[in-house]
Amino acid sequence: MRRKDSFVLFALSAFAICAPAETISGTILIKKRLTRRSVTPAVSVYQRGTEVKLGADTPEDPLVYERSRVVVYLEGPLAAPTAAIPDSPPAQMAQLDRRFSPDLIVIPAGSSVLFPNKDPIFHNVFSLSKAKSFDLGSYDKGDSRTVVFPKPGIVEIFCHLHPNMSGTILVTPNRFYAHPDATGQYHIQNVPPGQYTVVAWHKTAGFFKKQITIEAGHDASADFFIPLEESAN
């Protein structure tokens, strides 16, 4: 029995190493500003007690910023050995300068996220999202909380103590996802042959999908134009 189990484990490992896997590449084309940028408001309650500096948006090309708000990932059946989540440290969404930093992170389902408080004031972290609902209570600088996200979906994060604070966690169905670079190019590597839905999600514009078939020995491409009327100034 033990010999049989060992053979099965060896076979699965060999499959994960030797199975053909290809790359999906593409371009995210955005021609207009989609997101209304903001700074943390100077509310009087913040001036009581310990002073905490205000977070502000970093000046950059607006279209580069918009592309940074895009995640491309796959939906569809994936072989278990290739879809397994590799061991890695948890992602972090810190509370810093009265903001969630970063305010957008992407994790595969089953992963955990740390929420450290790096401000010298109390913060709270909660979500009422369908994919994951929780409330971590209020905690001070140096403390941290951890949340596991078992299901795919969008999780919106807020702070009860500071209503201006918000963040987003995109939980993907598997580890096959990518961020486009500053020019809009993305690459999802080591994809086994099969039929998939390529999903491009923009934090403001929403979801855009394309069907794709991956054949052994052939890479594939999927480009996305994300159309949304320009936000008002």
Image (tube, rainbow, N blue to C red):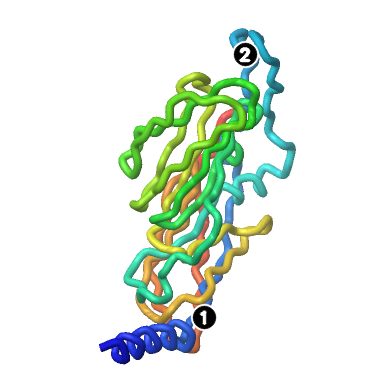
Q: Is residue 39 visible?
A: no
Q: Residue furthest right?
A: 59
Q: Earlier in the sequence, mark 2 or mark 1?
A: 2
The type of residue carrying mark 2 is Tyr
The type of residue carrying mark 1 is Asp
Which residue is at 40% across, 72% downward? 212
Rate crowding at label 1 as few (under 14), some (14 to 19) or many (20 or more) other CA atoms within 10 Å.
Answer: some
Q: Quadrant of residue 233?
A: top right
Mark 2 = which residue? 46
Q: Residue furthest front?
A: 2
Rate crowding at label 2 as few (under 14), some (14 to 19) or many (20 or more) other CA atoms within 10 Å.
Answer: some
Apparent side of residue 56 relative to residue 211 in the rendered image (left or right): right
Q: SS for tag 2?
A: helix
Above or below: residue 21 compared with residue 205? below
Q: Quadrant of residue 135?
A: top left
Which residue is at 55% across, 67% downward? 26
User: How far apart are the alpha carbons under marks 2 and 1?
Assistant: 53 Å
Q: Which-is-in-front pick, marks 2 and 1? A: 2
Q: Position of residue 107 (x, y in %)?
A: 48, 54
**Image mark count:** 2
**185 or 177, which lies in front?**
177
Apparent side of residue 21 relative to residue 79 in the rendered image (left or right): right
Which residue is at 47% across, 89% downward? 18
Which residue is at 62% across, 18% downward? 41
Mark 1 = which residue? 219
Q: Position of residue 192 (x, y in %)?
A: 43, 79
**68 or 19, which lies in front?**
19
Q: Position of residue 95 (x, y in %)?
A: 58, 32
